Amino acid sequence: MSTYSSTSTYTVADVEEVMCSVKADLIMIAGSTKAMTESDAANYAHDIEVLAKKNYLKFADVTLMNGSTEVRAVKYEFQTEGATGTARPGGVLWPLTPKDKGGWVRIHLRYTDSSSAEERAKLPLKISWVPASTDVGHKGLASSAGRNYSSNGFGTNREDFS
């Protein structure tokens, strides 16, 4: 007989609860900027949730671009223990920057060391993610405290840039 133990206090349902807030943020960004569709936002949220459930994400960085210029950004840093915060989604009514006027949303994921490209390739992702060396320091934007979303120790700290 085998026994197993786990030190995590969160469940898949906790990840789903946190991801509902992240998804709501992405849909608000899509709606206010018109730089991506709400369907695209939902697909990005789906993939981030799938990766978060496997504990494969350090962070997800979402940046509104106007051509090559950063306009606004949020960075979601994922925590698997001790996360706190119960903020409601919001605060991401970004400026109208439609696709047909040069607007676009760049999403950069940073993976944990516990995941491999082969493992991620087996997941049911909706986006074709490609390797990138994107600078997500947002040097031209000012950082401010965002919102924290958590459930039973799992969560994400959102840092806002404008």
Image (cartoon, rainbow, N blue to C red):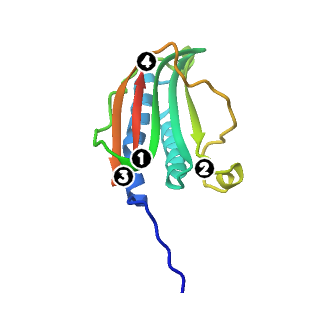
Q: Do the residues labelled 4 and 1 touch (CB within 8 Å)?
A: no
- Looking at the rendering, in which quadrant would you find the N terminus? bottom right
- Give the foreground label among 3 and 4: 3
Residue 85 in the image: x percent, y percent? 30, 42
> Would you say 153 lies left or right of 100 here?
left
Residue 94 in the image: x percent, y percent? 40, 21
N-terminal of the pair, mark 2 or mark 4, is: 4
Q: How far apart are the two marked residues, 2 and 4, measured between alpha carbons?
A: 28 Å
> Would you say 10 lies left or right of 117 here?
left
Q: Residue at x 42, y 41 (%)?
A: 23
Q: How far apart are the two marked residues, 4 and 1, measured between alpha carbons?
A: 25 Å
Q: How far apart are the two marked residues, 2 and 3, measured between alpha carbons?
A: 25 Å
- Give the foreground label among 2 and 4: 2
| Residue 105 sits in quarter | top right
Identify residue for label 2: 125
- 100 or 136: nearer the eye? 136
Q: How far apart are the two marked residues, 3 and 1, measured between alpha carbons?
A: 14 Å
| Residue 148 sits in quarter | top left
Badge 3, how many Cα within 10 Å: few under 14, some, many 20+? some
Give, as a three-letter code, the residue at label 3. Answer: Gly
- Give the foreground label among 3 and 1: 3
Badge 1, how many Cα within 10 Å: few under 14, some, many 20+? many
Residue 137 in the image: x percent, y percent? 54, 22
Residue 22 in the image: x percent, y percent? 41, 40
Identify residue for label 4: 96
Give, as a three-letter code, the residue at label 1. Answer: Met
Identify residue for label 3: 153
Identify residue for label 1: 19
Is residue 36 visible from the viewing direction of this image? no
Q: Residue furthest bottom?
A: 1
